[in-house]
Image (cartoon, rainbow, N blue to C red):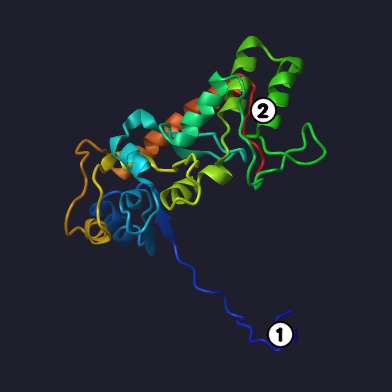
């Protein structure tokens, strides 16, 4: 098709690069990946949440990230798309979700509609985190022939869903007073627990290349050990769901 339009066509396959990102927190780990595994590039994300020069996190959530403990950062199934993602339990988004449940009106007001894909109860697609879907799903669950244990687990899964298409951008809109009422969701990996100070871009780059260390968690395991621990935890959760004959994963 490109040749028909008179455009130049490269018949040779493009060069491919192998990259790794997720969980890297020290210069030694970074260098190990580049030299031993001959990775072309590495990617760093979570530590930069504490670098205000290059990321947009409002002051309240910067403080929450600095104060986060092991139980505050978890691999959640909050996404209405059914894709696990790292979540900050103390974020305004999570606090609002729990408040709605306590007030007897679970679910989110669907503001953007980016995840309106579900037609289980309506002809027009709605979002699985929306108040309408949550209400109808909770009403329908007792009719699905589930055991008491299955029903409790399924109900909990429905209630976990958050309005992330709106809340994941909330920290930026809140910081710049675009939406003062925003309730941000923060997607930070567990490596946020290894850093506990606000840094400049120059300092973070120096940390990555080993010129200084910003690490504050001296007990942190190697990234490969941490990755193995995460896989074991995930396998435990999957085994639990399998034993209940339940699957909460939504096809993306």
Disc 2/disc 1 C-alpha distance (Å): 51 Å
Give x and y (percent) for residue 124: 80, 41
Q: Residue furthest top?
A: 148
Pointer 2: residues within 10 angstroms few (<14), some, or many (20+)? Answer: many
Give the residue drawn at x 38%, y 65%. Answer: 40
Are the residues flagged by discs 2 and 1 in contact, CB closer than 8 Å? no
Q: Residue furthest left?
A: 212
Query: Up-down: is 234 above or below 146?
Result: below
Which dot marks residue 213? none
For residue 153, side relative to residue 57 (left or right): right
- For marks 2 and 1, the one nearer the N-term is 1
Query: Up-down: is 238 above or below 213?
Result: above
Residue on which the image places disc 1: 3
- Dot 2: element: helix
Instruction: Give the quarter of the figure containing the C terminus.
Output: top right
Res 225 visible: no
Pointer 1: residues within 10 angstroms few (<14), some, or many (20+)? Answer: few
- Dot 1: element: helix
Give the residue drawn at x 20%, y 41%. Answer: 216
Q: Looking at the image, how many numbered discs can be counted on the residues?
A: 2
Instruction: Give the quarter of the figure containing the N terminus.
Output: bottom right
Res 248 visible: yes
Give x and y (percent) for residue 132: 70, 31
Judge depth for marks 2 and 1 and give the one in front. Answer: 2
Q: Nearer the viewer, residue 159 or 19?
A: 159
Quarter of the rendering containing residue 243:
top right
Give x and y (percent) for residue 21: 40, 53
Which dot marks residue 134? 2
Give x and y (percent) for residue 69: 31, 31
């Amino acid at each position: 098709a490109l040749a028909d339009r008179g455009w130049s066509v490269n018949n040779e396959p493009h060069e491919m690069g192998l990259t790794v990102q997720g969980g890297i927190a020290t210069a030694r780990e970074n260098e190990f990946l580049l030299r031993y595994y001959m990775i072309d590039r590495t990617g760093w994300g979570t530590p930069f949440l504490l670098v205000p020069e290059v990321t947009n996190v409002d002051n309240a959530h910067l403080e929450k990230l600095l104060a986060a403990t092991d139980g505050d950062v978890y691999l959640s199934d909050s996404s209405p798309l059914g894709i696990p993602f790292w979540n900050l339990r103390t974020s305004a988004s999570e606090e609002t979700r729990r408040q709605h449940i306590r007030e007897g009106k679970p679910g989110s007001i669907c503001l953007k509609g980016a995840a309106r894909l579900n037609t289980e109860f309506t002809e027009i697609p709605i979002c699985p985190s929306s108040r309408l879907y949550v209400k109808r799903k909770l009403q329908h669950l007792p009719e699905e022939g589930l055991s008491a244990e299955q029903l409790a687990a399924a109900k909990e899964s429905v209630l976990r869903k958050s309005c992330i298409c709106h809340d994941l951008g909330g920290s930026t809109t809140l910081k710049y007073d675009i939406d003062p009422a925003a309730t941000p969701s923060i997607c930070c990996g567990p490596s946020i627990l290894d850093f506990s100070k606000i840094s400049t871009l120059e300092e973070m780059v120096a940390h990555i290349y080993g010129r200084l260390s910003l690490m504050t968690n001296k007990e942190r395991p190697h990234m490969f050990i941490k990755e193995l621990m995460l896989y074991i935890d995930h396998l435990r959760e999957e085994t639990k769901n399998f034993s209940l004959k339940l699957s909460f994963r939504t096809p993306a």
